Image (spheres, rainbow, N blue to C red):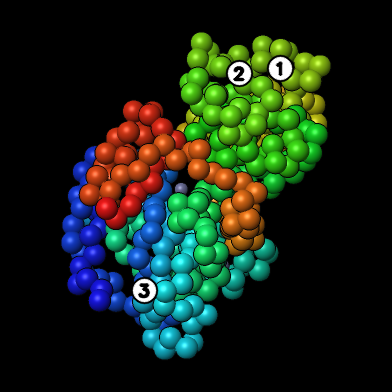
């Protein structure tokens, strides 16, 4: 028996999130109703909580939020025999899926799809999953795979694309600046690809995690200031600069400084988005005469979601060290506040 209401965390305004009994979602053809097994907090959710988010939350308030989750299928819209899914299956869903039919999808740029709908509402008992996500970006969990590991599929897909998508290879020197949850996953992915990672951040506990979890070969604290020339001299191979530099902070001044960490012919990836309207000053001589390649990748694609899921399902990457604690759904705001105070990486949100 399904309950008649769905306890859901709703965003009313910055710092005003309420848990309310919402009506159970009605399902259209091929949509799925998932009972959340585990949801995870994410830096983006924290941004939403603090400032709102016009793209993720839309402008219709109150809005449900949370987008990293795995759970059990408890409903299938329309004729169930038309669906590739069955009631009772344990699955993980990405928070979007491309249409495969627009200009960008035809170019293979699925993350830039014109019809990308971002799914929110994982901080709830149940979530309705659109048909295209059910069709193209949902994966069946092996029986032994815990929900909280599966729920890493989306953030790991973003991290993987941010590393593999800029061509990181075995043997390269890679500097990763910013060690939040995604930065940590990027350190781990680059290490697993055989790169030698230098992890750069301000807080010691993040630097320690980059070594213990991510396998960084060295760490650099910038608590006292970020001097890219000094770091390049002291920490990059022969002081020439790093093969690849990834900015995972999302601040314009850090974007600028990262240009100075790369070697001649190197790659700089401005990965973390900065706040709207911000600009960076680029040293044109540096970019041109050093032949820097600049990337700025956004979001994930079904191919990376599938690959991320495979790494998690096979145990190639165990993300659990990044789970700093668990909270019941009723206390999701406490999890966001803990993140705000810089106390942990990710929190698991469970129904009880
Ligand atoms: Zn996320
Ligand atoms: Zn499309």
Q: Is residue 98 above or below residue 333?
A: below
Mark 1, ligand 1, within 8 Å: the answer is: no
Q: Quadrant of residue 8?
A: bottom left
Residue 303, image x, y percentages: 64, 61
Q: Is residue 186 above or below residue 207?
A: below
- When the figure is inspected, residue 128 is found, relative to residue 219, above or below; the finding is below
**For the residues bearing labels 1 and 3, Cβ distance under 8 angstroms:** no
Disc 1 to disc 2: CB gap under 8 Å: yes
Kindly identify the residue that appears in the image at 36 percent across and 57 percent down.
122
Q: Mark 3: which secondary structure?
A: strand
Earlier residue among tags 1 and 3: 3
Where is residue 316 shown, x and y percent of the image? 65, 49
Picture coordinates of residue 177, whole percent (x, y): 58, 28
Answer whether residue 291 is visible to the viewer in this image.
Answer: no
| Comes first in the chain, label 1 or label 2 | 2
Drawn side of residue 25 relative to residue 140, left or right:
left
Q: Residue under circle 1?
A: 235
Instruction: Please tell me the numbered disc located at residue 14.
Output: none
Q: Which mark is residue 74?
A: 3
Q: Is residue 55 or residue 142 the one in the foreground?
A: 142
- Quadrant assignment for the N terminus: bottom left
- What label sits on residue 220 in the rendered view? 2
Label 2, residues with CA under 10 Å away: few <14, some 14-19, many ≥20 = some
3 vs 301, nearest the viewer: 3
């Amino acid at each position: 028996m399904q309950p008649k209401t769905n306890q859901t965390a709703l965003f009313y305004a910055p710092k005003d999130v309420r848990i309310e009994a919402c009506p159970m979602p009605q399902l259209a053809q091929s949509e799925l109703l998932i009972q959340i097994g585990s949801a995870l907090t994410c830096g983006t959710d924290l941004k939403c909580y603090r400032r709102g988010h016009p793209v993720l939350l839309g402008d219709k308030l109150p809005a449900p939020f949370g987008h990293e989750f795995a759970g059990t299928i408890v409903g299938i819209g329309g004729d169930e025999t038309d669906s590739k899914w069955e009631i009772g299956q344990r699955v993980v869903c990405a928070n979007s899926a491309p249409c495969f039919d627009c200009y960008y999808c035809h170019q293979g740029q699925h993350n830039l799809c014109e019809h990308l709908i971002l799914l929110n509402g994982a901080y709830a008992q149940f979530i309705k999953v659109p048909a295209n996500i059910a069709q193209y970006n949902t994966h069946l969990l092996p029986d032994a795979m815990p929900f909280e590991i599966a729920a890493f599929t989306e953030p790991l897909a973003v991290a993987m694309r941010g590393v593999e998508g800029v061509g990181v290879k075995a043997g390269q020197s890679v500097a990763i600046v910013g060690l939040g949850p995604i930065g940590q996953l990027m350190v781990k992915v680059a290490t697993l690809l055989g790169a030698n990672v230098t992890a750069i951040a301000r807080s010691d506990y993040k630097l320690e995690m980059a070594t213990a979890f991510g396998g960084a070969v060295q760490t650099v604290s910038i608590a006292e200031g970020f001097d890219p020339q000094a770091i390049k001299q002291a920490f990059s191979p022969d002081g020439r600069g790093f093969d690849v530099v990834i900015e995972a902070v999302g601040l314009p001044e850090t974007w600028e400084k990262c240009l100075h960490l790369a070697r001649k012919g190197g790659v700089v990836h401005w990965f973390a988005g900065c706040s709207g309207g911000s600009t960076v000053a680029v040293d044109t001589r540096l970019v041109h005469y050093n032949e820097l390649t600049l990337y700025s990748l956004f979001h994930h694609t079904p191919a990376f979601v599938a690959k991320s899921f495979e790494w998690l399902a096979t145990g190639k990457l165990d993300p659990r060290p990044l789970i700093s604690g668990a909270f019941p759904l009723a206390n999701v705001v406490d999890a966001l506040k803990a993140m705000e105070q810089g106390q942990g990486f990710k929190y698991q949100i469970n129904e009880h």
